[in-house]
Image: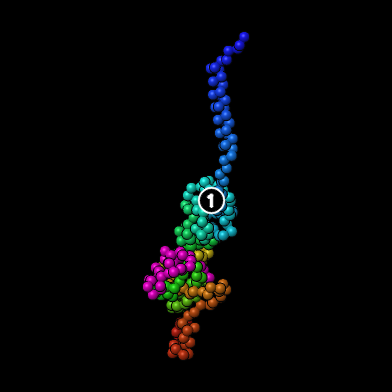
Amino acid sequence: MEKKINIKALVFSLIFTLISYGFVFGYIKSLEKPVPETVEIKLLVSSRNIKAGEEIKPEDIATIDIPEDALPEGVINDRKSIEGMYAKEPVIKGEPFRPERLVRWEELALSFSIPENMRAVSVYVNERSIFSNLLRVGDKVDIIGNYIIKNDDNQEIKVSNTIIQNVEVLAVGPNRVRNNTEENHVSPADSELPRVITLCVTPIDAEKLAYTSAFADFAIALRGDEDRKQVETPGVIIEDLLPLNKSGLLMGQIGGEE
């Protein structure tokens, strides 16, 4: 007897075979496609823990490799935009640099400019106390106090004496920029004298400066850039400037003698 062939089963088997072949062929073709390469970039991060108020120097910046599409949004990834800036807030080692945490020197709170155990004191100045409008932030100056004292005979003696030496200028008026550039430089001839200057002094010198500013008068003497030496000065009275035997004054006129 001849066996009957199940046409339907044969057709379904053929269709299933074709479909399976299609899946297998598609899978094999997908394996042949090249895998796209991941593009990596260098991300700038902090090489150490940076405290608030510290300047960011070139050695404080490190790099790590990350996929290009993994670059954090809003970070600064340009060295020129980071170097020379100051940390407004602490930056942790390995952390990217964000614009809201970096400021320029003049934007940093003044308190970050004051060394430990020092004080910032602002004093009013005028054309008599400040030598010119050439004074700049970062200069070192001496303060000369001008006083009127009385001797035992209740006669007034005027004396000038250097009371504070080698103190740094933190600000001239509102300006805290250390170095003038072509962009922020103002010609002295075209600018006005500042009304106040801010000095960095010890607590004791802060008291001397406060007293002199309130009850006497003072002048500012600019130091050379490399001059750090403390000098002992006895002070000056009129006799030191005009010897009595040449000025026509009597020897006892200042001392109260007849």
Q: Quadrant of residue 254?
A: bottom left
| Above or below, comparing residue 38 to residue 230 in the picture | above
Q: Nearer the viewer, residue 255 or 80?
A: 80
Type of residue at label 1?
Pro
Main secondary structure found in the magenta portion: loop
Q: Nearer the viewer, residue 3 or 38?
A: 3
Where is residue 97? Give x, y as percent.
Answer: 52, 52
The C terminus, quarter of image: bottom left
Q: Nearer the viewer, residue 240 or 226?
A: 226
Whether the magenta-drawn stretch holds residue 183 is answered as yes
From the image, tell me which residue sits under label 1.
Answer: 96
The residue sitting at 58% across, 50% down in the picture is 65
Outermost residue, right side: 1
> What x and y, as percent, mark residue 167?
51, 68
> 149 and 181: which one is in front?
181
Q: Can you see residue 113?
A: yes
- Is residue 252 magenta-colored? no
Q: Quadrant of the N terminus?
A: top right
How many callouts does the rendering have? 1
Query: In the image, residue 200 lies at what x, y percent?
Result: 50, 65
**Vertical order, 206 against 154 (above or below):** above
The segment highlighted magenta reads 166-195
Q: How is the image coloured?
A: rainbow
| Residue name at image x 39 percent, y 68 percent | 195
